[in-house]
Image (spheres, rainbow, N blue to C red):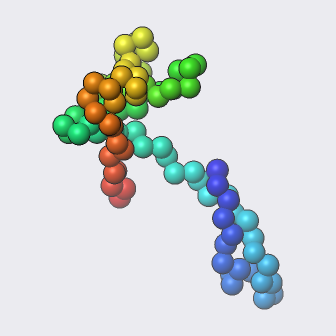
Amino acid sequence: MTQQLTDPTNLPAGDRRPVRVDLPTPPAPELFETPEGRHWRLAGTKDDGLRYFVPAHLDPAKIRASLWASEAYLNAELGEITPVAQVTA
């Protein structure tokens, strides 16, 4: 969670002190793209602290973690992977 100061104009009795409000932390990007346009889904982070991916059309929960591709492997073999901007409704 991140914290941000709110606009104090909506406080009762003209109280102008800033009030802290907990805002949800934006979700981490889940889809990534290679320079060739291949999409990969973030599967998770293992004990080594590195990020691992599966092809975007697969569900990481249904793929054994031993088959996940590491970020280092994808960068070395397919080129630098970058987050895909996701449109929110």
Q: Residue at x 50, y 26 (%)?
A: 50
Left or right: where does residue 2 sit relative to residue 44?
right
Q: Is residue 19 above or below residue 15?
A: above
Q: Is residue 53 above or below residue 20?
A: above
The C terminus lies in which quarter of the figure? Answer: bottom left
Q: Say how many tags the image has.
A: 0
Q: Position of residue 42 (x, y in %)?
A: 40, 32
Q: Position of residue 82 (x, y in %)?
A: 34, 42
Left or right: where does residue 7 sit relative to residue 39?
right
Q: Residue at x 40, y 26 (%)?
A: 72
Q: Is residue 6 above or below residue 12?
A: above
User: Which residue occupies the foreground of this view, 7 or 73?
Assistant: 73
* Residue 77 visible in the shown view: yes
Q: Position of residue 44 (x, y in %)?
A: 47, 27
Q: Residue furthest bottom?
A: 14
Q: Residue at x 32, y 46 (%)?
A: 84
